[in-house]
Amino acid sequence: MTARLDMAVATQFVARLHAAVNAHDAEGIAALCSEDVEWNDPAAARPLRGRAEVAEFHRLGMFRALPDVRIEVTDGPYLLMDGSGIAVRATIAGTMSGPLHPPGFAATGTRVEFQTAEFSLIRDGLLVRHTVILNMLELARQIGAFPDSGSLGERVGVAVQHASASVMRRRARRQSRGR
């Protein structure tokens, strides 16, 4: 059985993880993970499995897109009631001066800043599961991938969605009638 985390260990672990991010050290981040880590991040195309995928995601994704990225804890860490993990809120900021893969967004040269919630399960001092939650719509607006609220671009997008929804409803009705 794995030992329960205490606040001192949790605080130290978060500090080491975020120091590796702030140093842009993909291998340092991966070294804090178990061999079979599951890393869930909405910026990744799929859940990452294992240290190599975690390192590659940071090296070729985050650090390429945001080469000056910084993360700062804004709240926490909080211990899970059973002592198996931690949760924190953080702010991530940087300049999008490189492409974001996936999905292939071009560099904007603009500064982005967004909030995250991170939930980490830890076993034997290593991450076994890490889940990042963030408002992807807000981030998409900051990098120009989605129009601002109330803009002409948003109104055009809504009109396209309405047309698409109409087609989808007709298709669903045909399928429910067995055609």
Image (cartoon, grey):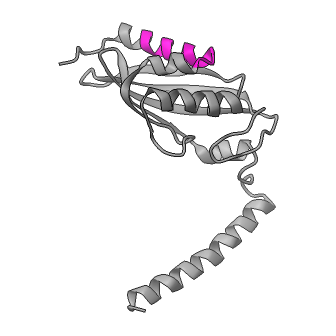
Q: Is residue 65 found left or right of 82 in the rendered image?
A: right
Residue pushed farthest left? 1
The residue lying toward the viewer, choosing from 90 and 52, is 52
21 part of magenta stretch = yes
Q: Residue at x 42, y 86 (%)?
A: 175
Residue pushed farthest front? 52
Q: Is residue 63 found left or right of 53 in the rendered image?
A: right
- Could you tell me which quadrant the C terminus lies in? bottom left
The residue lying toward the viewer, choosing from 30 and 15, is 30
- Could you tell me which quadrant the N terminus lies in? top left
Prevailing secondary structure class for the magenta stretch in the rendered image: helix
Magenta stretch bounds: 12-25
In the picture shown, does residue 159 fall above or below 146? below
Q: Is residue 145 found left or right of 53 in the rendered image?
A: right
Q: Quadrant of residue 67?
A: top right
Q: Quadrant of residue 166?
A: bottom right
Where residue 94 appears, x then y in whole percent?
Answer: 71, 27
In the picture shown, does residue 162 fall above or below 50? below
